[in-house]
Image (cartoon, helix red, strand yellow):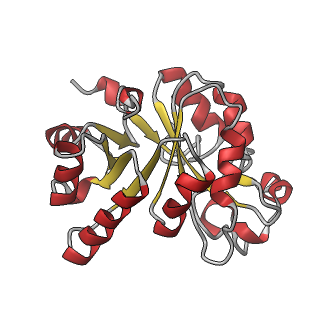
Amino acid sequence: MADLSWLTARPVAHRGYHDMNRTVWENTLPAFARAADKGFTIECDVHLSSDGVPVVFHDHDLHRLANADGYVWQRTADEMGALRVGTTGDHAPRLAEVLDLVDGRVPLVIEIKGTPGHDNGLVAAVASALRDYRGRAAIMSFDHWLIRDFAKDAPGIPGGLTAWGTRDQEIEAHFSMLAHGISFVSYSLDELPNRFVTFVRERLGLPVLSWTVCNGEGLKKTFAHVDQMTFEGFDPDAVS
């Protein structure tokens, strides 16, 4: 089993170390620079542009973050780069820009966001962007159809399941992903603990992150049940 101690060594800044979209917006280069300067691991979200380029943006549609109509999959990478994020002059970057900015200073956890019918080749495109990257990086997804591509299209890159839910149907679906060689799990804080997380940590020895921690209480709950947190809205280093 690969050593993933780096994945849980430091808190993971959710969409970068933004300030809840007041002046530093999520998934922008300033948010990632701010996280790297603090030594936080960085989580970012990636979609596939219409011309097959991994671009960093959370939502499927463009309205909330860019005040524009339509969807990420309808825009080229250049068109995404021309959009301004929120009230800033910052753009929606390509994954390659984020890699150049971070340059191995801190680990990256890349959440791959699928859009059924419009994400063919996304996992392979992310793996291609990471091929010559010298820093530590992992990929993860909520989307089971993408996780099934991890071993084939992104060999050698640690892959994780992002998950929520405690109903039997949800838990059993998560268990089915263990057949696809996942290396870690990121689970909703509100639904900890649960039998799936307990199994993967105690029986399989896989690291588990929580999402999304917003205060000291969430920090305490995280470390009562899992190995590290994905956070936003506060500085975990300042919590005693």
Q: Position of residue 209 (x, y in %)?
A: 32, 44
- Total numbered badges shown on the rendered structure: 0
* Residue 59 visible, this angle: yes
Q: Nearer the viewer, residue 186 or 215?
A: 186
Is residue 137 placed above or below 54 in the rendered structure?
above
Q: Position of residue 223 (x, y in %)?
A: 19, 37
Quadrant of the rendered structure where residue 161 is? bottom left
| 216 with respect to 174 (left or right) | left
- Residue occupying image coordinates x 15% and y 54%: 193
Is residue 178 placed above or below 145 in the rendered structure?
above
| 84 with respect to 45 (left or right) | right
Is residue 20 placed above or below 4 in the rendered structure?
below
Q: Nearer the viewer, residue 155 or 32?
A: 155
* Residue 55 visible, this angle: no
Q: Position of residue 113 (x, y in %)?
A: 56, 61
| 189 with respect to 130 (left or right) | left
- Residue occupying image coordinates x 55% and y 26%: 36
- Residue occupying image coordinates x 51% and y 36%: 42
- Residue occupying image coordinates x 59% and y 35%: 32
Quadrant of the rendered structure where residue 64 is? bottom right
Q: Position of residue 104 (x, y in %)?
A: 60, 24
In the rendered view of the protein, which quadrant contains the N terminus? top left
